Amino acid sequence: MPIVEDRAFQDEAIELTRELWRAYLINRSDEGDQVIARVLDIENLSVIGTGRHEFCSTAEQFFENLTNDRSEAGDVVFDILDEYYEARVIDPDVCLVFGTLWVRERPSEPKLLLVEMDTRFSVLYRRVGNALKLVHLHHSTPNFDQRINEFYPKTATERANAALEYSKELERRADLDSMTSLYNRMAFERLVDERLARGASNAVFCMIDLDDFKAVNDTLGHLAGDRVIIDFADALRSAFQDDSIIGRVGGDEFAVMLCDRASASNVERLATRLIEAWAEHGSDQPIPFSCSIGMAKVGGFGDFQELYRAADEALYASKRNGKGRWSWYG
């Protein structure tokens, strides 16, 4: 198959996969179900999902499970926080799409815990006439407790032998981002608001973003991109210690509230050290690593959202001025 046709086939399959995930997760309607039904290869379909019941060797089984899942979920819908797709043409009429999908429940009213899934998937299509038909779908959610380089979640198994300690771990886990073990967005926002309520006029709020992270994924691959996110979380822990609050608030977006050592000169020193350390960390990579930082002094802001907007404005000033630098709000 010529390269141009190969690329067009891959793009078509990837776009169809995006459409299917949105029909399944967001467009929960008859129209969305029609999109799903139209794409499936009814005669040859097989689906393996994340639940014990989600092993379907026929389209009839799949639609039965889909109906039951929709009934159980009610009006729950999801926001797609991050997604990644790759495609491989197997032969002129067959294409494999694989990737990751990070989604979080969009609640109709505030809730303490939200459903969140960081899914890996593979989808096999074959061309029938002028249309692509989905032959096989496999998606799974990695075990949260399985650490890097562990063949199985040995650490969690050992912890489970002490039931009380494990219970405490479960409570703590609800506040953590599954990839980096930094505070997740909800926990970070809550902790910042709690600190503001106790009085933190001398604190500083920082928004931090990895520059050109898409290029990192495109050049090094998505799995290596995940490793970069994890390494950057470690760099944040090293740069901001003591009672600083550190969180991952988006795909490659992080935030820090410095409660100690928060004089302007000291914050600038810490920010400079982080930027330089991160550039050095990526010095042996085919593309340069850099991060941009926006900083806002807490005094004069009433809550997390106000601080977030101020620091985010400063962050984009850093981006506009060349990246790999810090800027103050105001």
Image: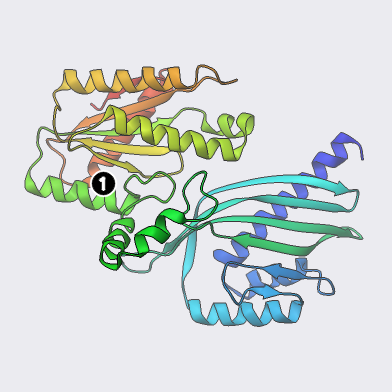
How many numbered tags mark residues here?
Answer: 1
Residue 62 place in picture, x, y as percent: 69, 76
Residue 110 showing in the rendered view: no
- In the picture, which quadrant includes the N terminus? top right
The residue located at (78%, 45%) in the rendering is: 88
Residue 191 place in picture, x, y as percent: 21, 49
Residue 129 place in picture, x, y as percent: 92, 60
Please name the residue that numbered disc 1 is placed on: 305
Q: Image check: 185 left or right of 282?
A: left
72 to 216, vertically: above or below: below
The residue located at (36%, 46%) in the rendering is: 181
115 to 179, vertically: above or below: below
Q: Image check: 94 left or right of 253?
A: right
Residue 27 place in picture, x, y as percent: 57, 66
The residue located at (59%, 50%) in the rendering is: 100
The single residue placed furthest to the left in the displayed view is 199
Q: Quadrant of residue 175?
A: bottom left
160 to 43, vertically: above or below: above
Query: Camera-side residue: 47 or 192?
Result: 47
Q: Image check: 298 left or right of 161?
A: left
Query: Camera-side residue: 237 or 300?
Result: 237
Tell me the element at label 1. Answer: helix
Q: Image check: 85 left or right of 45?
A: left
- In the picture, which quadrant includes the C terminus? top left
Residue 269 showing in the rendered view: yes
**Three-letter code for the amino acid on which mark 1 is drawn:** Gln
The colour scheme is: rainbow
The residue located at (23%, 46%) in the rendering is: 304
Q: Are there few (<14), some (14-19), or many (20+) residues within 10 Å of tag 1?
A: few
